[in-house]
Amino acid sequence: MSEQSVDLRSTWAVLRRRAVVLVLAAVLGAGGGVALLTLRPPAFTSTSVVLLPTVSQAGSGRLGGYDSATQALIVTSSEVLDRAAEQLSPRPSVAEAADRITVDTPASAVLRITASGPTGKGAEELAAAVASSLVDYLEETRGSLRAAQQAQLQGRLDTLLKSLDSVNAQIRGATTRIATNGTTTAAGLADAAALADLTAVKASTLLDVEALRKQLAGDDGSDSSSPAAASVIQPASKGEREGYATDVLLNVLGGATALTLLAAAVVVMTNKRDPKLRSRDELADSVGIPVVASVRARPPRSAGAWLDLLRGYDPDSTDGWALRRLLHSLVADVEADRGAHGPVVVVVLSFGDDAGGLTVGPQIAAFAASTGLAAELVAMQEHRSATHLWAACSHTPRHDEAPLPLAVSTAQGRPGAHAAVLSDEEGDPEQVALSVRVVVLDRDRPEPDPAVVDGHVALFAVSSAAATRRNLADAVVAVDRLGLDVVGLVVANPDPFDRTTGRLVTVQARGPLARPTWITPRGGARTTRSDAATPRGDTAAPGGGAATSSTSAARRRDRRRSQP
């Protein structure tokens, strides 16, 4: 569960970092939905209703008539649609008309015909044409059925008339025989009985003939077995777009949601394949070095902009407090020993193509100077990406320019050049309390110059998402080979959604940075790490120089660790 929550939190952080991409995807998706709605707008619809009346079935007393389900199929038949198409201009094909027609049966004897079209008038005309064509078709069917019934009734009437003629002939014969033979004889009695039966049959036949004649005439007054005519009980309604607002909303939201989800999936998958380190914990874990500060960097783009930064760097309260804590850790109580010792030398390393990391060293020096600490900035190992910074550090101020609050110079890889420059500018190199030396390394070949990469403590400045685990490891190993420890990472422009601390616990953050001691000697003699980090270029400085400062700094750290 914990691993799952961490993964979800990191995924959410990735999505928040790419919020601009997701918003752009949502806008494009919404635009695509609008474009689709424009190219294929919802059709206009019109509805007409046809009534199929029920009739009484002759001789059964049941109600019957047209079956609505069957008639719904008849509406979409070619017979009805072809008739409807003839009434329209331009005339659509039967298949096209069938695609634009839907039929449902809200009741047993009711058909509701809905027609669609690109215009309201077209939908209305199609609905009216189909409804009238269905009524005409049913009327023709009803006429054909009535003709067949008339023929059947006429045939039955003819049969009854023939039967009636035969009965009349038999009655006349029986009457003649009775008159001849009399009613007392056996033959007379038989003829009298037959005459009575024939008279009854004749009466019944006459009634049937009269009923058939009335049915043929249509005025018999009885229920007919043929159904009445169908009728349009609701003319075609005005063609309108139903649910147009809903369609617009669905298209816009659907397009925005679909493209946003797709963009989110691409962003998450791409981030998983991206080896660059973003959070403080990732940077700290990559080389086992804690993050000692996180500041926002404003990379200048010209030599004049670099001079402006050095002259008037004014961080906000958050960055100011982070830099103040960093200075407390690096140069604690340096003011008490500055009269007897040289400056504390801080080497700030960064990658050449990391503009944010390059800006950290000058910002540290400028902030230290703004707090009243005598500081200097030395551009040590040059890189083509830091040309403007080197130009600013080698700039000779004019008489009308405001002086910088700190000393700046370049070493260009020559030992002792820094001390000579300081002597020209300051007159006394021991007055400088903090010397920030900027070293820029090539990412592909991080090879520090052993002639210039010297100092009491080293920091590595790196921007979020500017380096991989391998980049940092190669750089730290290269610096370690020169006998200088990277004791902390400074993250420039940290991810605003990063809530990690860089593995720096509270106890570590309060006191000065601990200096490790070598158990096994390097190069023969047993020495401490601080002794090994003695600046090579400052051993000849007056008054003990940087070598005395290095030893004094080590003693001060030992005293702090021994204090309760």
Image (tube, helix red, strand yellow):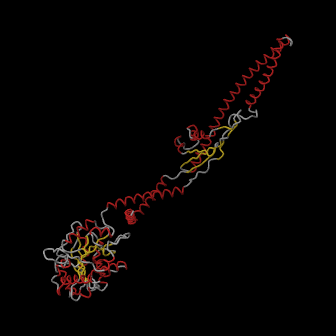
Q: Locate the N terminus by quadrant.
A: bottom left
User: Could you say where residue 372 lies in the image, as x and y percent from the top left?
Assistant: 30, 86
User: Could you say where residue 174 lies in the image, as x and y percent from the top left?
Assistant: 81, 14
Please name the residue shown 26% across and 88% down the image: 336
Is residue 563 visible in this depiction of the protein? yes
Q: Is residue 228 above or below residue 387?
A: above
User: Could you say where residue 490 lies in the image, as x and y percent from the top left?
Assistant: 30, 74
User: Could you say where residue 167 lies in the image, as x and y percent from the top left?
Assistant: 77, 19
Q: Residue furthest bottom?
A: 339
Residue 80 falls left or right of residue 11: right
The number of discs equals 0
Q: Residue furthest front?
A: 564
Q: Is residue 70 above or below residue 342?
A: above
Q: Locate the C terminus by quadrant.
A: bottom left
Quarter where residue 161 is shown: top right
Front residue of 372/282: it is 282
Front residue of 57/197: it is 197
Quarter where residue 91 is shown: top right
Residue 464 falls left or right of residue 552: right
Front residue of 229/531: it is 531
Residue 209 falls left or right of residue 373: right
Please name the residue shown 41% across and 60% down the image: 25
Residue 212 falls left or right of residue 179: left
Is residue 397 visible in this depiction of the protein? no
Please name the residue shown 62% across and 39% down the image: 67
Front residue of 244/128: it is 244
